[in-house]
Image (cartoon, rainbow, N blue to C red):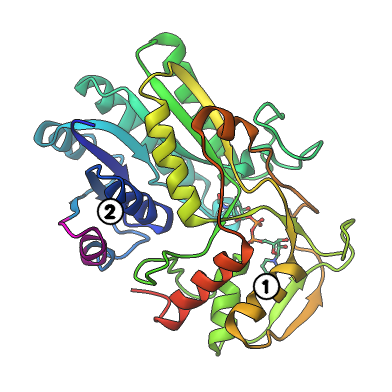
Amino acid sequence: MDGKILVTGGAGYVGSHVAMALADAGLVPIILDDFSSSSRAVLPRLSALAGRTVEHVEADVRDTAALRKLFHDHPIAAVIHCAGLKGVGDGETRPLAFWDVNVGGTMALAEVMGEAGVARLVFSSSATVYGQPESLPVGEDAPLKPNGVYGRTKRAAEDFLRDLTRANPNWRIALLRYFNPAGAHPSARIGEAPLGRPDNLVPLLCRIAGGGFGELAIFGSDWPTEDGTGVRDYLHVQDLAEGHLAAIRFLATAPGATAFNLGMGRGWSVLEVVRAFEAACGRRIARSFVPRRPGDVACYYADPARAEALLAWRARRDLDAICADAWRWQLAGGGY
Ligand code: WQD
């Protein structure tokens, strides 16, 4: 492909793995990040892994002047938009920031892409847009009923992007709805680096197994699932990153906006994840049961058939690989 692929939020957890997958495929990523929730230290690691300098621009995705300069200075062929605020709990206390960055940031980016004549966009969305699913597995045409601020900002950004393609058929947009990304690059040089005590299950298991983070509080033992604990569709962040590459290729020929579920297409319970993680790290995870976490659902997993059919993409790395790579990353320090 001629030109560079702009990865907004490219220093973050998903974005850094996307940048790496692009470089591995012989494409040229350029990262935009303001490092508000990521580390500059990811950049030399990406360059070392890629065997060439991975370029970056430091700016906020809402900064249209900085975006205009970026599009002026670099030949951009397509954009993968990962920059945004995430966190279900965090969104509830900071609605203005979440709407401004997640929706306003997407609008600012689209404005400048339009001016620059760049029409291919892959958007980081989330399975959170579905809320409590009515049936399983969850297909892309399931109703979008997010039950929190974070999910509503993702749905609004999706709506906005669909409106763009309706008004101007030049736009080609993929809306990627991630299920539960986990794991790290097998090199253990890049991975998820949450600040403080992580909220998500796999990074929390890493910290607990590493010591100093107490025990795992399992949110509920009375869910209507096989072992009573919550069931989710965990997918390896490397598989997720490769899904972005497949989406970029798909957009070479596909007009309009298309949503894709990126998941394994099956679920694992909290206890199954704990056991897989114990096997990977060779340590016992201390745990106890506590009441359900507000807002949690019993079970959801993706129907990834559309991604398989149209993107020729399927998550290939299993839960054991997710746990092994997450633990290797933790052993290497689990951060930057
Ligand atoms: C997984 C399972 C918990 C922590 C969230 C967002 C979603 C997406 C991914 C971005 C659940 C249980 C967890 C703990 C536990 N993010 N658990 N004890 O809630 O499925 O999804 O992250 O887009 O939008 O909602 O992920 O990792 O928090 O939880 O028992 O201390 O582990 O109840 O069943 P979740 P999670």
Q: Name the residue under label 1.
A: 276
Residue 58 place in picture, x, y as percent: 20, 52
Q: What's the amino acid at mark 2?
A: Asp
| Residue 34 circle label | 2
Count numbered badges in the picture.
2
Residue 178 place in picture, x, y as percent: 56, 45
Q: What stretch is highlighted in magenta?
A: 44-53
Nearest to the observer: residue 300 or residue 111: 300
Nearest to the observer: residue 70 or residue 259: 259
Residue 325 place in picture, x, y as percent: 49, 70
| Residue 262 circle label | none
Q: What element carries label 2?
A: loop
Residue at image x 43%, y 36%? 246
The span from disc 2 to disc 1 (Cα, nearest Å) is: 35 Å
Horizontal side, residue 156 vs residue 241: left or right = right
* Crowd around label 1: few <14 · some 14–19 · many ≥20 (10 Å): some
Residue at image x 68%, y 87%? 284
Residue at image x 52%, y 46%? 95
Residue 4 visible in image: yes
- Main secondary structure along the magenta-highlighted residues: helix
Q: Would you place residue 253 above or below residue 306 in this image?
A: above
Nearest to the observer: residue 82 or residue 329: 329
